[in-house]
Image (cartoon, grey):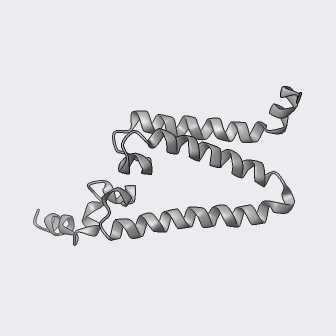
Amino acid sequence: MPNIKNFINDNMLSIAAFITTGAILGIVQIKVSLKLILLERFIPGWGWAELVLLSVYASFVIHKMKDPARVAFWRRTTWAVFSGVFFAKLIGGLFGIAGAMIVAFITAGSRSILTGLPRLQEADNL
C-alpha cells in the first residue's frame, strides 16, 4: 500500500494548485453577480464542473512542470491552450456570440468601444 505521507509530500505543489484554483474560482462563482466562468454563461449551473476541470488542469500543469527538462515544452503547451481559448472567446464575441464576449467588454464603460464610441460623443455635449 502506498504511503499517503509520501504521496502528499511528492505532490504538495499540485495539491496546493488544485485547492487554490478551486478556492479562488469558487469565490468568484458564489460572490460575483456577473457570470465570469465561461461554461456558466452557456449552461447555467455547470460553472462548478468547469471549476473542477480548471482545478485539475492547474494541478496537472504544476505536476508536469516540476521536471526541469520538460518545463519549456509545458510552458509552450499551456500558453498555446490559453491563447486558443482567449482568441476563440475574442472571435466569438466579435461575431456576436453573447456568452463568448470577453469580460472587459461587458462592463458599461467599455461597451462604447464596440458601439461606435457614443459615450465620447455624449461627453462632448456636456
Q: Is residue 30 above or below residue 75?
A: above
The residue under the point 65% across, 61% down is 78
Residue at the outermost left position: 125
Q: Position of residue 94 (x, y in %)?
A: 34, 70
Q: State the quadrant of the C terminus.
A: bottom left
Residue at the outermost front position: 1
The residue under the point 40% across, 45% down is 40
Q: Is residue 112 above or below residue 14?
A: below
The residue under the point 73% across, 49% down is 62
Residue 30 left/right relative to 78 = left
The residue under the point 77% across, 65% down is 72
Q: Would you identify the image quadrant in which residue 73 lies?
A: bottom right
Q: Position of residue 29 (x, y in %)?
A: 44, 38
Q: Would you identify the image quadrant in which residue 35 lies?
A: top left
Q: Is residue 50 above or below residue 125?
A: above
Residue 7 left/right relative to 110 = right
How many numbered discs sit on the rendered protein? Answer: 0
Q: Position of residue 45 (x, y in %)?
A: 39, 39
Q: State the quadrant of the N terminus.
A: top right
Residue 112 left/right relative to 5 = left
